[in-house]
Amino acid sequence: MTSETSLPPETGRRARRAPRGMRRHSVRWVARRRRHLRQLPPTLRALLWSMLAGMLFVVLNSTMRALTFELHPFETQFLRYLAGTLVLLPWVLRDGWRAYLPRDMRGQFLRGGVHTFGLCLWFLAIPHITLADTTAIGFTTPLFIMLGAWLVFKEPMRWERWVAALIGFGGVLIVVAPKLTDGNLYSLLMLACCPVFAASFLITKRLTRYESSGVIVLWQSITVTLLSLPFAIPVWQGPNATQLWLFLICGVLGSAGHYCLTRSYRIADISASQSVKCLDLVWASIVGWLMFADVPSQWTLAGGVVIAASTIWIARREARIARGD
């Protein structure tokens, strides 16, 4: 006789087949989503990649800010990129190290050097200003990027992009101006790193012409790790186990964020994808409130509304232009 808790043979076979069927359904669902994404206009896909990168970077920056309260900023910078390199090693082992040899080693180290300099400024400032203010000040970077892309790569700057950039920059001024008038030198330090990061992103754009996204992300981690080590050694203190785990998480977040950003640059003009970065202020305000009890000021909220409006407008305009409407 069959007990009440046992299953009939047919039911048992169906139960064993269920996980296999669920896996097939999940694979088909992912394949359908990927086909749908490929059908979107390139500019819109670039905007989506850039938005995802922004969300990842906000979570990364909040974790980095928490770690700089416990360790020196330069040590935090070194360990963050070392962890990013370690996170990427399984892919290197799977594909072989030859698959990740860059075609332009000089360009990789140039990009790493520029990015390291910007990071030194950023990590020195991040413990002293809120996450929302950090993000708002960082919105000046797209302006430098669009200007650089126009001057260096001769990318077209349609009037819509100029208007969106100016409106977004106006929103940034609403957020930043009260802090600068209070004489916050760390806000100025954060502002100084923005053109440096813009130069780094422009070098990345040039590298995407003949380097894969994986090669660019890996060698950024390697070069920044090597170039940050001399700054970290004089201030070194041993991290504990919890901090090491957080650095590994940061390595995953940073590598994923840079991968998404590189995909965005590969799909469309770099200037087309920059306006969506203004949404980072929304994520930063939410995460800053949850992690650090940082309540955004009325100026931050007002500037965020202006920035979000410009972002939504340019996203709709770019999608319409790509469709030929």
Image: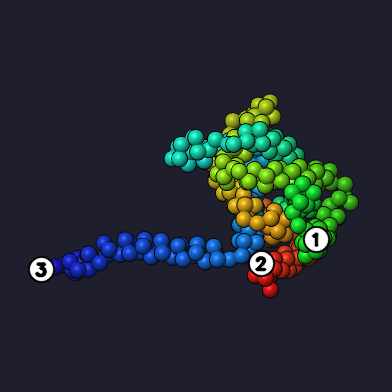
Total labels drawn:
3
Residue at left offset 54%, top offset 62%: 38
Judging from the image, what secondary structure is the residue with disc 1 in?
helix
Three-letter residue code for mark 2: Ala
Any part of residue 321 in sight: yes
Three-letter residue code for mark 3: Met
Which residue has dot 2 on it? Answer: 322
Residue at left offset 69%, top offset 55%: 269
Disc 1 to disc 2: CB gap under 8 Å: no
Horizontally, is 293 left or right of 300 in the view? left
Horizontally, is 102 left or right of 3 in the view? right
Horizontally, is 321 left or right of 249 in the view? right
Which residue has dot 3 on it? Answer: 1
Residue at left offset 59%, top offset 30%: 238
N-terminal label among 3 and 1: 3
Judging from the image, what secondary structure is the residue with disc 3 in?
loop
Q: CA distance from mark 3 to mark 1?
A: 79 Å
Quadrant containing the C terminus is bottom right
Where in the figure is residue 293, as x and y percent of width and height? 68, 55
Which residue has dot 1 on it? Answer: 162
Q: Nearer the viewer, residue 296 or 231?
A: 231
Disc 2 to disc 3: CB gap under 8 Å: no
